[in-house]
């Protein structure tokens, strides 16, 4: 695997708050999920990878280039969907994507419009390209955001919470779209949704307090909870909830006679972020 | 619908190869509109690539959004189409903002009618802050798509400069119109120009360190305090004498140098 994203001991502080603390990880083509609770540093990391922020210390190499020295070159090969893309008031879908295309240095009107039509088609919005963005549903607006991120066929695509606030049907459509985008690019997907990560990502990086506490495959994350998830007639473990069958699903240090069940990625994630560090493999 | 004649082989070949004159071509096309048999006979003779090209041209024209009035105006003035679009979305070049700026300048000009000395000071103090307000609203967080602009290869300092120039141009035009219509002292009309240039360029330069809104607020606050302080102490419009005009020129030049030196820091 070619490492298209390489971070080494990256630190970023805002005043007294340390958003990223000695963050180190590498990833390559395909979809990589960034998981972590609120305030873990996901958005700061995505903004740093988008070259919007510069690290206080450490090094960031994207697509084989230094993110500070070669930021212009990187920006030409980058697609970025922030949490809030900032749609211009009154713009149609076509106008907004066209505006971003100009910011991406596409100055030839005919070629630019062809590219705008291509990306709008890629996210399935051709029929509404003349509609004002404010009249579209949340899912369609997100697709507009993704369309602008695909302008110029970028090699690195950064998506910050693209499925937040979407209903289940829209999220399934997004999975289809993002998996297609990730077929020939490096995609970094910041999310709270472990189901999206399980369905889409070849690799996962879990952030906590600005540092990486896990980097591996979804199967490896799931494996962290192996032997630590069981069902019982009463509440037990670090975390426990009642299932539809009237039993309790427990996560944590299991008793010897526990009725163990197959863990999920969510179980591994919860254990990783839970208060049972002795049970978490290094 | 029946037709008196049909397109023969020779005419069909000449038409598809573009070898007939416009009048005859129009006649053929009028016939094709009403004759399905001739349309069918013509299909194999029309080059597919040419049809696709023509269709692409039609789609390009139909799909392309019509430029907004401001963009059309800028294009008529010789601004390139993509630059006109970048300017067209500037928050402080929208009609509402321009109207608010015009109103602020109008009140400032009307204030000159109240008292000779302090009224003039109000105009000369307020007028330079109007373009500063417009400039800080032209880029930075005031621009909804600022985050996308930061991650795009288009130079942020270039974006800021073209928008600031446009905003400054609009404000100068507004001040000239209101001033020429209502001001008796035509000298005062020009006196605010250099301070306005100095304040806006200084605001731009400081925006490489701070958020434009904060930079503009600080500069405007300092300017208004300076004008008020001078007016209270000397009781005349000393701030607009030749010394201050020269100082403004120097500040504008130094700010331009700073903008050039720190151009990479804007992004």
Image: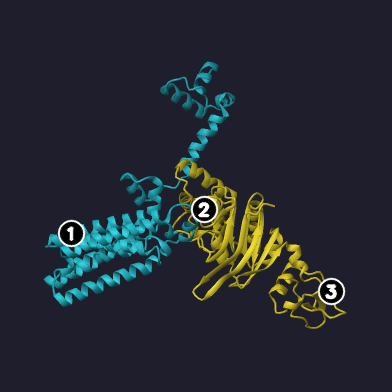
Chain colours: A yellow, B cyan
| Residue B80 seen in this snapshot | yes
- Secondary element under disc 3, as helix, strand or loop, is strand
> Chain under label 1?
B
Residue density around tag 3, few if under 14, some if 14–19, many if 20 or more, within 10 Å: some
Of label 2 and label 3, which has the lower sequence position? 2
Q: Quadrant of the C terminus of chain A?
A: bottom right
Side of A261 relative to A120 (left or right):
right
* Marks 3/1: CA–CA distance: 84 Å
What is the quadrant of residue B122 in the picture? bottom left
Which residue shows up at 49% across the image and 74% down it? A15
A275 over A93 or under it: above or below: below
B237 over A88 or under it: above or below: below
> Chain under label 3?
A
Report how many numbered discs are placed on residues in the image.
Answer: 3
What is the quadrant of residue B201 in the picture? bottom left
Q: Nearer the viewer, mark 2 or mark 3?
A: 2
Q: Position of residue A98 (x, y in %)?
A: 47, 50
- Secondary element under disc 1, as helix, strand or loop, is helix
Q: Are marks 2 and 1 in contact (CB under 8 Å)?
A: no
Side of B238 relative to B86 (left or right):
left
Q: Are marks 3 and 1 in contact (CB under 8 Å)?
A: no
Query: Can you identify the residue that label 3 sits on?
Result: A260
Side of B124 relative to B22 (left or right):
left
> Camera-side residue: B95 or A55?
A55
Residue density around tag 1, few if under 14, some if 14–19, many if 20 or more, within 10 Å: some
> Camera-side residue: B32 or A40?
A40
- Secondary element under disc 2, as helix, strand or loop, is loop
Query: Can you identify the residue that label 1 sits on?
Result: B190
| Mark number displayed over residue A70 | 2
Q: Position of residue B72 (x, y in %)?
A: 35, 47
> Chain under label 2?
A
């Amino acid at each position: 695997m070619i490492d298209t994203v390489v971070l080494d001991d990256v630190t970023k502080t805002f005043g007294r708050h340390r958003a990223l603390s000695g963050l180190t990880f590498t990833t390559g083509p395909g979809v990589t999920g960034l998981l972590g609770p609120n305030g873990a540093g996901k958005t700061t990391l995505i903004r740093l990878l988008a070259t919007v922020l510069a690290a206080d210390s450490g090094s960031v190499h994207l697509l084989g280039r230094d993110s500070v020295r070669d930021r212009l070159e990187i920006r030409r090969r980058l697609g970025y969907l922030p949490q809030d893309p900032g749609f211009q008031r009154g713009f149609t879908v076509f106008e907004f994507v066209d505006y971003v295309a100009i910011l991406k240095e596409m100055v030839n009107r005919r070629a630019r419009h062809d590219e705008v039509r291509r990306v709008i088609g890629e996210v399935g919005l051709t029929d509404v390209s003349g509609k004002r963005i404010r009249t579209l549903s949340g899912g369609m607006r997100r697709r507009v955001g993704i369309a602008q991120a695909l302008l110029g066929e970028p090699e690195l695509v950064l998506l910050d919470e693209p499925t937040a606030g979407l209903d289940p049907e829209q999220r399934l459509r997004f999975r289809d779209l993002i998996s297609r985008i990730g077929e020939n690019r490096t995609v970094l997907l910041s999310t709270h949704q472990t189901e999206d990560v399980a369905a889409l990502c070849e690799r996962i990086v879990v952030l906590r307090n600005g540092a990486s506490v896990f980097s591996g495959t979804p199967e490896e994350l799931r494996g962290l909870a192996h032997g630590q998830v069981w069902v019982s007639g009463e509440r037990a473990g670090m975390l426990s909830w009642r299932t539809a069958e009237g039993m309790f699903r427990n996560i944590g240090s299991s008793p010897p006679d526990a009725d163990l069940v197959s863990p999920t990625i969510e179980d591994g994630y919860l254990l990783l972020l839970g208060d049972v560090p002795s049970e978490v493999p290094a | 619908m029946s037709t008196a004649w049909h397109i023969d082989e020779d005419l069909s070949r000449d038409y598809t190869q573009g070898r007939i004159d416009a009048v005859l071509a129009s006649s053929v096309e009028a016939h094709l509109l009403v004759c399905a048999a001739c349309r069918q006979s013509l299909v194999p003779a029309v080059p597919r690539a040419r049809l696709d090209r023509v269709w692409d041209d039609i789609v390009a024209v139909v799909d392309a959004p019509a430029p907004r009035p401001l963009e059309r105006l800028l294009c008529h003035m010789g601004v390139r189409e993509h630059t006109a679009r970048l300017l067209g979305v500037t928050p402080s070049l929208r009609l509402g903002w321009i109207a608010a700026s015009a109103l602020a300048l109008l009140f400032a000009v009307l204030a000159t009618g109240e008292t000779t000395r302090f009224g003039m000071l109000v105009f000369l103090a307020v007028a330079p802050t109007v373009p500063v307000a417009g400039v800080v609203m032209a880029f930075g967080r005031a621009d909804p798509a600022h985050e996308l602009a930061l991650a795009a290869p288009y130079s942020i300092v270039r974006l800021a400069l073209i928008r600031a120039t446009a905003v400054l141009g609009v404000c100068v035009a507004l001040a000239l119109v209101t001033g020429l219509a209502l001001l008796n002292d035509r000298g005062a009309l020009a006196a605010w120009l250099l301070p306005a240039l100095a304040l806006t360029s200084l605001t731009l330069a400081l925006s490489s360190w701070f958020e434009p809104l904060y930079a503009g607020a600080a500069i405007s606050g300092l300017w208004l305090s300076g004008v008020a302080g001078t007016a209270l102490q000397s009781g005349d419009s000393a701030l607009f004498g030749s010394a201050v005009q020269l100082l403004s020129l120097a500040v504008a030049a130094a700010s331009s140098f700073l903008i050039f030196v720190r151009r990479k820091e804007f992004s």
